[in-house]
Amino acid sequence: MARIVACYKWVVDEADIRINPDRSVDLSKAKKKISDYDKCAIEAAVQTATAIGGKAVGLTFGTADARQSLKDALSRGLEEVYYINAEEAAQADGAATANALAAAIKKMEEVNLVICAEGASDTYQRQIAPRIGAVLDWPVATSVSKLEVTGNTLTAVRKLDDCLQTVKVELPAVVSVLPEINNPPIPTLKAVLAAGKKPVKEFSAGELNADLVPKTRVADLQGYVMSRKNLIFKDGEAVDQVKELVAALKKEGVI
């Protein structure tokens, strides 16, 4: 049976992040969740697997605390989840993460399609799908707002800056989906209870034999401060005020 793999990340809930007066970031009281964008990737995998009679499975790379994500992921329609439990995940960048995920995918059987979000809600680096495709040597389609699988062909609609582009690729392939591809439903109580009985396969870093050494490291993390100019346009007629506003926006490079 063809497997549709949804990759997801266990991230800090942005609603719990606090910025201190010195711009340092306080995560001490922050809970974690599946990235909101990755919930769309999970739903896309479930819908695609249902359409082709395949099997939707989840895949995550994280430290020990990512174990908390498994039941939530399974309650969203996945039939099983593969969990890479490695402390290296705490410092992993896009390269290390993609290496880990690709190594796990290689150990699975009959993987036809890998679906990632365009980016995770904590970093939104937009690296994972292209990097997985490069490691596996599979075709990649990014910025996908709609996808359909017919036989061994994937048809994807890509949303670009100024147009929509429809591409077709032969499977197996990797895609990254935009948030607008679907509206992930909230799991029902029945689905949550059933999730506890679904299978989980856990990999250690040693089992995968993947290069988990990051190529980049975070040197510092500070809260973002927006400097506002507080320009007020109140003199003259409305049409003149609009012209002044447009001129100011052009000067700042906004338009």
Image (cartoon, rainbow, N blue to C red):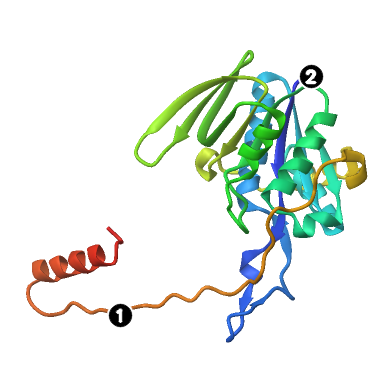
Q: Quadrant of residue 102?
A: top right
Disc 2 versus disc 1: distance between alpha carbons?
A: 60 Å
The image quarter containing residue 110 is top right
Residue shown at 68%/37% (left/top)? 132
Q: Position of residue 116 (x, y in %)?
A: 64, 40
Label 2 sits on residue: 1
Q: Amino acid at mark 2?
A: Met
At horizontal 52% and vertical 35% (from top left) the residue drawn is: 144
Relative depth, front residue between 208 and 61: 208
Furthest-front residue in this view? 215
Can residue 103 be seen from the camera position used here?
yes
- Residue farthest along the bottom direction in this orientation: 21
**Does residue 216 sit above or below 100 in this rendering?**
below
User: Any mark on residue 230, and which?
Assistant: 1
Instruction: State which mark lies toward you, 2 or 1.
Output: 1
239 sits left or right of 27 in the view? left
Give the secondary structure at mark 1: loop
Can you say whether 241 is above or below 51 in the image?
below
**Side (left or right) of 138 relative to 231:** right
Which quadrant holds residue 160?
top left
Label 2 secondary element: loop
Name the residue located 89 percent from the left edge and 42 percent from the top edge: 203
Q: Between residues 75 and 13, which one lies in front from this camera angle?
A: 13
For badge 1, the amino acid type reads Asn
> In the current view of this chain or complex, which residue is farthest to the left?
237
Q: How would you rate the neighbour count of disc 1 (Cα within 10 Å): few for under 14, some for 14-19, many for 20 or more?
A: few
Q: Picture coordinates of residue 167 (x, y %)?
A: 49, 24
Disc number for residue 222: none
Viewer-nearest residue: 45 or 251 = 251
User: Nearest the camera: 2 or 107?
Assistant: 107
Mark 1 or mark 2, which is nearer the start of the sequence? 2
